[in-house]
Image (cartoon, rainbow, N blue to C red):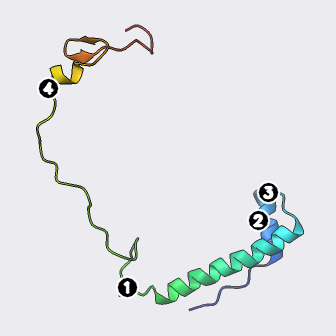
Amino acid sequence: MEVMPEITTEQVAHLAELARIALTQDEIDHLATELQQIVGAVEAVNKVATPDVPATSHPIPLTNVFRADVVQPSLTAAEALSDAPDAQDNMFRVPTILGAE
């Protein structure tokens, strides 16, 4: 596997200029170091990510935690509307907010 060349402060300054990001020299130095560490971490993952290792999005398997969708008794329309301030045709009646239709 080939070794990635070092990320230089000149490269970071050039990218910052292309992105129109104003950076101080201290920020450029700091970002060059951080970007080099990120590249190193990606290289380490690439070394172990061989074709026989399946890709994963989580380190442990996830399972569905939802309950089964089972119909159960609930309120009737009359019970649901019993405390409504205003109802009409088995529906809640509310003030118009988007204009008359």
Callout 4: 10 Å neighbours few (<14), some, many (20+)? Answer: few
Disc number lying in front (2 or 4): 4
* Real-space Cα separation, disc 4 to disc 3, in angstroms: 61 Å
> Which is in the foreground here, disc 2 or disc 3?
3
* Residue mark closest to the camera, 2 vs 1: 1
- Mark 1 sits on what residue? 53
Q: Which residue is mark 3?
A: 21
* 97 relative position to 78: left or right: right
Residue tagged 4: 76
Using the image as rendered, state which of residue 27 and residue 54 is in the foreground: 27
Q: Nearer the viewer, residue 34 or 15?
A: 34
Q: Earlier in the sequence, mark 2 or mark 1?
A: 2
Res 26 label: none
Q: Position of residue 93 (x, y in %)?
A: 31, 13
47 vs 9: above or below: below
Which mark sits nearer the N-terminus, 2 or 3? 2
Q: Are marks 2 and 4 in contact (CB under 8 Å)?
A: no
Residue to which mark 2 is pinned: 15
Instruction: Please report whichever mark, 2 or 4, sits nearer to the chain's N-terminal start.
Output: 2
Q: Are marks 1 and 3 in contact (CB under 8 Å)?
A: no
Is there a contact, CB below 8 Å, between mark 2 and mark 3? no
**Three-letter amino acid code at disc 1?**
Val
In the rendering, at what x and y percent does residue 81 appear? 23, 19
Q: Which of the 4 image quarters holds residue 72?
A: top left
Q: Residues within 10 Å of mark 1 (few under 14, many from 20)?
A: few
For badge 3, the amino acid type reads Ile
Q: Amino acid at mark 4?
A: Thr
Q: Foreground residue, 54 or 51?
A: 54
Dot 4 or dot 3, earlier in sequence? 3
Above or below 33: residue 50? below
Distance of mark 2 from mark 3, alpha carbons? Answer: 8 Å
Position of residue 87 relative to residue 11, above or below, is above
